[in-house]
Image (cartoon, helix red, strand yellow):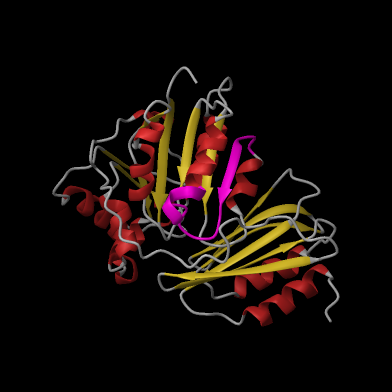
Amino acid sequence: MTSKVPTNIITGFLGVGKTTTILNLLKHKPENENWAVLVNEFGEIGIDGAILTDQGAMIKEVPGGCMCCTAGVPMSVGINALLRQKPDRLIIEPTGLGHPKQVVATLTSEQYHNYVDLKATIALVDPRNLRNAKYTTNQNFNDQLDSADVVIGNKVDVCQPDDIEAFNHWIASQAVPKTFSQLVEQGALPLSVLEIERVQGSASSHIEHHHHDHASQEPQFELPPGEAFIRRENKGQGYFSCGWLFGAEYEFDFDQLFSMLSDLTAERVKAVVNTDQGTYAFNVANGVVSVNQMSLSGFESRLEVIDTHLMPWQDLEVILLKLCGIAQA
């Protein structure tokens, strides 16, 4: 490589709209540029990578908890694989239950000194969460905002005036002013934000090792021969996740799946599913189900559920198998 790759970390808590924001950025990137995205998810079944692949970006996934665990090996492997493809820009999306500090420390290490031009760390926040003790007392939520140079208030279209006031007050009260802040809808982040320079030392390299349990260091995405589906679980920092991967030959009943997701009380649900009406991405946050049709075909359906309580995964699995017509033993 003859020049450093401009690199952005886009962080934020569960359900804040990181993937939607990255999708918007990809849609508006210069046509002559090839972008790469490293996606990290708390769950063991990769969802975001499937969604982003539909936009033609080079994607690498690190599921199963914080990608900075185990001496940063999973993260470095993913970064190296993407850099070898010589992208014009690299975007890194850490898990919503993680923080960017170790990612920053890795990208600013000697290993990547000649290859990565790390720009400002961007944190997304739902302004409604700034008035909710469930979030404001969460250490990772605060760490993500504190370590960011740029803070974007997303989902302003569903916010109340008090939420907007809370965001503006939070920005104004920072002892160390943020380089840039803005309120946006639907993750409509202007491309110019990606060029904002990083404040040196804005994210400490000191990391407390309190990350997730890993079901595996190298999660497998392909189904074993003869298997109709697989299930993977993870837990950490007071959250539990369970994910399923289904063979591409199975189709879900769209209406019944939508109804089931609407009734599900989990904190966070993401899915990319083959249905009788086509392939769709499902996103559940704050009790609202959003759906987007995708151009993918012949794709293995996948669904991930995250909650603060251990849910009856087996009961949910029975419902999912029924919805896609897999015979149960």
Q: Quadrant of residue 182?
A: top left
Residue 249 within the magenta-colored segment of the rendering: no
| Residue at image point 42% right, 33% down | 7
Q: Residue 185 in the image: state x and y as whole percent.
A: 44, 46
* Residue displayed at 74% across by 70% down: 256
Query: On the picture, is 130 further left or further right than 29?
Result: left
Which one is in front, 5 or 25? 5
Classify 244 as above or below 100.
below
Kindly indicate the quadrant of the structure image that contains residue 303: bottom right
Tell whether 15 sits left or right of 144. right
For the point 42% across and 24% down, the residue is: 4
Confirm whether the magenta stretch covers residue 63.
Answer: yes
| Quadrant position of the C terminus in the picture | bottom right
Q: Is residue 187 visible?
A: no
Query: Which x, y percent locates residue 279?
Result: 74, 52
Find the residue positioned furthest to the top: 2
Q: In which image quadrant can residue 152 be found?
A: top left
Left or right relative to 210: residue 79: right
In the picture shown, does residue 99 fall above or below 324?
A: above
Q: Is residue 216 visible?
A: yes
> What number of labels is visible?
0
- The residue at 74%/45% (across/down) is 296
Look at the image and give the residue range highlighted in magenta.
55-74
- Given residues 256 and 311, the one toward you in this image is 311
Report x, y in % for residue 137: 28, 69
User: In the current view of this chain or complex, which residue is farthest to the left?
Assistant: 175
